[in-house]
Image: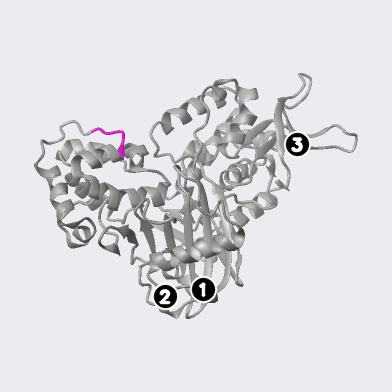
Amino acid sequence: MTVEDLAELHERATELHVVVVGGGAAGLVAAREAAKVGMRVTVVESADQVGGAIRTGEVAGLTLDLGAESFATRGGHVASLIRELGLDDDIVAPNSAGAWVAGVPSVGAAPLPKGGVLGIPASPFDEDVRRVIGWRGAWRAYVDRVRPPMTIGHADSLGVLVRSRMGARVLDRLVAPVTSGVYSAAPDDIDPDVAAPGLNTALTRTGSLSGAVAELAEKRATAPGGAVKGLRGGMGSLVRALAADIETRGGELLLGTTVAAIERAPDDADHAWRVVLDAAADDGESAALDAHAVIVATEERPARALLAPVVGSELEAEPPVAGPVVSIATLVVDAPELDAAPRGTGVLTVPGSHRAKALTHASAKWAWVAEAAGAGTHVVRVSFGSVDAPPATDALGSDDQIALALEEASALLGVSLDAAHVRGARVERFQQSQPAATKGHRQQTAAARSAIRSVAEIGAVGAWLSGTGLAQVVPDAIDEADRLRRALLFAQQ
């Protein structure tokens, strides 16, 4: 392509307007991609701040993560974005001490064994594994090695696979706490091909589940959940940098504004779409934005409602499976007894044993949080809710929510904490997307994508399509924005 060709494309790009509906991470990444080539971009966000589940806020004078606190390093996509935004010096690694598991019958709490895959151990007789599952559980798990080999190692349910090969104790005490804590889902609903790529292939090669795990663990050399990193000062700095970069490139952010509908523009218009806002103009008509392309970056249910009239009934044919609702209570406590990090960087729970599904000891996990809090002051995050049940905090008033979080933190950390210890607290509630590792998710999203992409100037991004987590959201949003850029720029060539 010649210099003249590039100049012509850039000139055409500046004449194009892209509207992005939703200012979460996916929407901001997609908007930035459009703005990078000179397109005029407008991001419409219903909340009064961007970021969605990635948000920071003040608790007891400390600026802390209130939602997502880290990103998975796989693929390198998030780290690359962070470098582009000039935040690479702020990337930090967590404490490698590891987490514990609580609610183990006759044991109470114990360190979560390292070196497995999704909690599945490579060697059931290792001391840290046997401490959790007992001798009975270890011998039952060992049966996996002496059973007939799995010559065709394909399973579509993690729970069924682990239960049949290693037994209930491995499933309930090791695997279920990990899937509940990471995916807010039961093991039976998790697709191993998505949650642990390569596991089924390794099963065929090695003939046993423990052999497959040993092979994968040797390659990964990471704890359950994968390697993660964070940002000094909180992940909110990433979305703030994205928003600032969009505005620097001439983009516009409309906060506190809801989109009512996406409509075809009149045939004689020089643009394809009208994005109707849920607000009236001065003349009483519905306010609207003219757009050459629209990218929908909301949660699944509102996304389907906006897209179905535009792309067809395919998005109505398969009603969305609701993702889990999760509540995170962030507590700042004066508790010198936590200086020793008695339960590592956090605690996962055996489902049904506690009202909380997990706890993160943030000041033990992240050095920057400990430095900001100071000696003797600690930050803990208590998580509630799963795909099977709403958060236990939902039926409570604000004071009772904090009291419950404090009660669960005491039990999970093994340290007595009461209201006198609390310097500040805050509870945030999130509607999560269905985890990508859920059985059938890939087929549902493939059908949705096919329908969306049947209209060249319409796109959609977000965790409901890509899977949860920035490591999946970011590259997917970049790819979708690139598809629309190409459709617009080369439409008349």
Mark on residue 277?
A: 3
Alpha carbons under labels 1 and 2: distance apart: 10 Å
Classify 10 Å Cα crowding around label 3: few (below 14), some (14-19), many (20 and above).
Answer: some
The answer to whether the residues at label 1 and label 2 have Cβ atoms under 8 Å apart is yes
Dot 3 or dot 2: first in sequence order is 3
Mark on residue 338?
A: 2
The answer to whether the residues at label 3 and label 1 have Cβ atoms under 8 Å apart is no
Alpha carbons under labels 3 and 1: distance apart: 43 Å
Classify 10 Å Cα crowding around label 2: few (below 14), some (14-19), many (20 and above).
Answer: many
* Residue assigned mark 1: 333
Q: Please state which amino acid type lies under the numbered disc 2.
A: Leu
x, y (%) of residue 113?
26, 59
Q: Please state which amino acid type lies under the numbered disc 3.
A: Leu
Q: Secondary structure at mark 2?
A: helix
- In this rendering, the answer to whether 160 lies above or below 348 is above
In the image, farthest residue toward the right: 283
Q: Residue at x 65, y 39 (%)?
A: 20
The nearer-to-camera label among 3 and 2 is 2
